[in-house]
């Protein structure tokens, strides 16, 4: 799954890391902060909504691509 986010720096990644790491069912995830759309790529069988809610809880904008 790929998402456009507002996670735009190392500090932002550090803020969202514990929340994403705590979600059972996420195999791996990565944020490309060099991409203008700050693409979050998640490997999981979970529904998109669970990823969206987790990132929003951390205070970031997110939309599915």
Image (cartoon, rainbow, N blue to C red):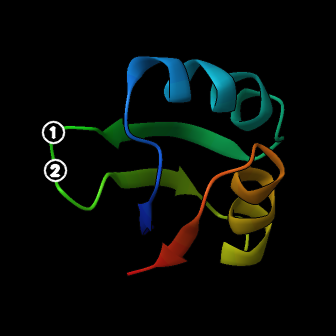
Residue at screen point 46% across, 54% down: 6
Observer-nearest residue: 55 or 9? Answer: 9
| Number of numbered discs overlaid on the protein picture | 2
Q: Are marks 1 and 2 in contact (CB under 8 Å)?
A: yes
Q: Which residue is mark 1?
A: 34
Q: Quadrant of the N terminus?
A: bottom left
Per the rendering, the mark at residue 50 is none
Residue at screen point 38% across, 39% down: 8
47 is higher (above) or lower (below) than 45: below
49 is higher (above) or lower (below) than 44: below
Q: Quadrant of the C terminus?
A: bottom left
Left or right, residue 42 beside residue 22: left
Crowdedness near tag 1: few (<14), some (14–19) or many (≥20) residues, C-alpha within 10 Å: few
Left or right, residue 57 beside residue 29: right
Left or right, residue 22 beside residue 65: right
Q: Which residue is mark 2?
A: 35
24 is higher (above) or lower (below) than 51: above
Observer-nearest residue: 64 or 34? Answer: 34
């Amino acid at each position: 799954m790929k998402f456009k986010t507002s996670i735009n720096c190392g500090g932002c990644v550090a803020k969202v890391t514990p929340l994403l790491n705590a979600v059972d069912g996420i195999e791996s995830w990565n944020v490309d902060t060099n991409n203008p759309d700050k693409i979050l790529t998640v490997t999981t069988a979970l529904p998109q909504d669970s990823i969206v809610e987790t990132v929003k809880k951390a205070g970031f904008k997110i939309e599915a691509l």
